[in-house]
Image (tube, grey):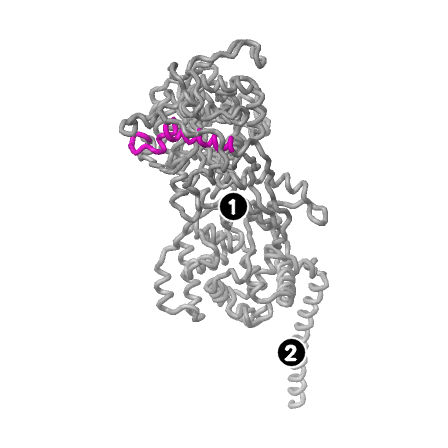
Amino acid sequence: MTTKKVTSFKKYIKWFWGIVLGGFSLLILIFLFASWGFLGALPTFEELENPENNLATEVISADGKTLGKYATENRTPIKFKALPDNLVKALVATEDERFFEHSGIDFYSTARAVLKPGSGGASTITQQLAKMLFTGRASRNIFLRIGQKVKEWVVALKLEKQYTKQEILTMYLNKYDFLNQAVGIRSAARIYFGKEPKELDVQESAMLVGMLKNSSLYNPLRREERVKQRRNVVLKQMNRSAFITLQEKDSLQKLDLGLDIHKEGHSDGSATYFRSHLQKVLRKWVQNNPKPNGEEYNIFRDGLKIYVTIDSRMQKYAEEAIEEHMSNLQSYFFKEQKRNKTAPFYDLEKDQIKGILDRAKKNSDRYKRLKIAGKSNKYIDKVFKTKTKMSVFSWKGNKDTLMSPNDSIRYYKYFLRSGLLSIEPQSGHIKAWVGGIDNKHFKYDAVAQQKRQVGSTFKPFVYATAINQLKLSPCEEFPNIPYTIPKGKYGIPEEWTPENSNKKYGGMLTLKDGLAGSVNTMSARLIDMVSPENVARLATSAGIESEIQANPSIALGAVDLSLIEMVSAYSTFANKGLRVSPMILTRIEDKNGTVLQEFIPETKEVLSEESAYVVLDLLKGVTQSGSGVRLRLPWKKASYITGHPYKFTNPIAGKTGTTQNQSDGWFMGIVPNLATGVWTGGEDRSTHFAGIDKGQGATMSLPSWALFMQKCYADKTLNISQEDFEKPDNLSININCVDKSDKKDDDKKEVIPEEDTDF
């Protein structure tokens, strides 16, 4: 019996060791099969060195701030040194306590998970990274899942061999999708807290680490209370790992999430119109600048760094100024339209209004989608007449309403639009670009896409031509009488005798008086003295790229131009007659920091330094006694639209412009190191104020310029000049005129100069 028992025991021992050794052998064999690729392809050494990522292209301002991104996935990778210590501790304490001890697979945690279900996950941070990078979503098939798990282990071991612990941890945080366009830890920190990762507090880091469990389940924008509970679990884990004290844990768990949402979609954030324009520029750039291997750069995936001329501070001030003024101006327009039977249009018949609305309908995305889907016109008309739930723009925030698409088209026609552009004349750098009032609802860019009649803002080019060619002094006097250019001259079909808008004539006027008062008879006389061709030639040389018909009417601004053309051309006056082409790019780098191209502006001489200075002197007269004088007046009534006076005391060269029926209001303002232009008007020329009081450029656009400059001057880090323009050493043209306004006690009168319209 004893012998049989011993034999049986030995038999069991053999079976035991056979199972154990067989199991280990099978496990080793499975690992070998996986590493040989029998369970599916594994990443190569090169793939491990360069794991494929969709990296966002980042737009970086002149002062080093991220303005926005172009991305398939909004991911901008960072290095380990950019991670705060509290984030690393929160991650390790919650996801992988033995991270710095194991070699990719934590067999202790794996055994614990098998023997004691519910005791915690077995996947290490390295395994989770391997799964994200190379093995994909877990399969529901148990056998495929086992094979996938083995591949995950093999890749994890390779990652541990290839990278340091810090690199693995950083790759994991850079790769994870935190939802809401926040791919990677840097995007998550910026979007949820408006911070760079290094600036995250302990509780903020804990919230982001908590999302790693399941970002859909723990989405801060939808399940704030659940996210807070998960964050508190992370804080508890940090306390258990002795990273924070019990008192710290208790106090931090009581805090709210403290979200500070900064969305980074293409229509969110700062400089949205600028970024849309830049995207078009970059698409052309990639076509002409291929990679070394001949492939074309992808601005949505290749992680380029685009350094631009925009200053984030000035951009912010420009957007604030437009919003502050336009929201106020719009309230006046809404009130006026209550008395308008054809609101928001004037001067149109019913069939003309219908034509405008039909064109807007056919240009809408909804109409185009229905047409592509093959829907009939009858069906489309029914859709556009049917009320539906929608969110529409308002200056008090988007509002949910029930409205038919036809009604929404007319609703949006009520809104006045505006654009602002600011250029540093000496460098050509565009510092601020506001293309409209809201990029989500009004896509059309008033800076570069739109061209509108410029009115009196074109007159300085007429005066500049006369001064540059004839050396006329601002003090030169001419009679203020109707001036006629005869039929046939310059090819005009009829004789041309423009009227002064105020119908006032008589006496003598200096050039300075003529420009300050925007006197049409003076402009007509000057353009006849130098010819329309020469005026058009100078304007083109100064930066106007649109075709200018060389006829006398351009003296009154009968030409459609873009805001960027106008500001660029005006910059020539501030840069001593030298034209510097406007710049938006300074350099482009690839994802590794290699400079792909640096950009240099083009320069050329347009007019003499002396002539440019004399033009500036004339333009200063506009803000001293002309339509721009409300920049200086102390009375509240001088700026009643915004509710407070501006009281600028520094030299400002400027020009207002108002076109027929108040359809367009312009203001161009220059100080020595900044030229800024503003346009305001309706989408359609028939959408405008009924009267000149609110419809002139001095009321529609000048306030935005003033608010912007006030903000810029208040920020001393910008160094925006308040000095006078530099006077040429050998100025031969007399500019010391007897200012007639000095003889009057006008400063005591509450009289606001009225802008002259030009037609």
Element marked by disc 1:
strand
Q: Which mark is residue 68?
A: 1
Badge 2: residue crowd in 10 Å (few <14, some 14–19, many ≥20): few
Q: Position of residue 145 (x, y in %)?
A: 62, 59
Residue extent of the magenta highlight: 610-638
**Relative to the observer, which residue lies in front, 269 or 118?**
269
Residue 580 relative to residue 630: left or right: right
Of the two numbered discs 1 and 2 on the same chain, state the one appearing first in sequence: 2
Residue 566 relative to residue 7: left or right: left
Q: Position of residue 270 (x, y in %)?
A: 47, 43
Report the residue that reaches farthest toward the bottom. Answer: 2
**How many numbered marks are there?**
2
Q: Position of residue 597 (x, y in %)?
A: 63, 47
Report the residue that reaches farthest toward the left. Answer: 748
Q: Which mark is residue 16?
A: 2
In the depicted structure, whether residue 244 falls above or below residue 584:
below
Q: Which mark is residue 183?
A: none
Residue sitting at 60 percent across and 70 percent down? Answer: 103
**Relative to the observer, which residue lies in front, 246 or 702?**
702
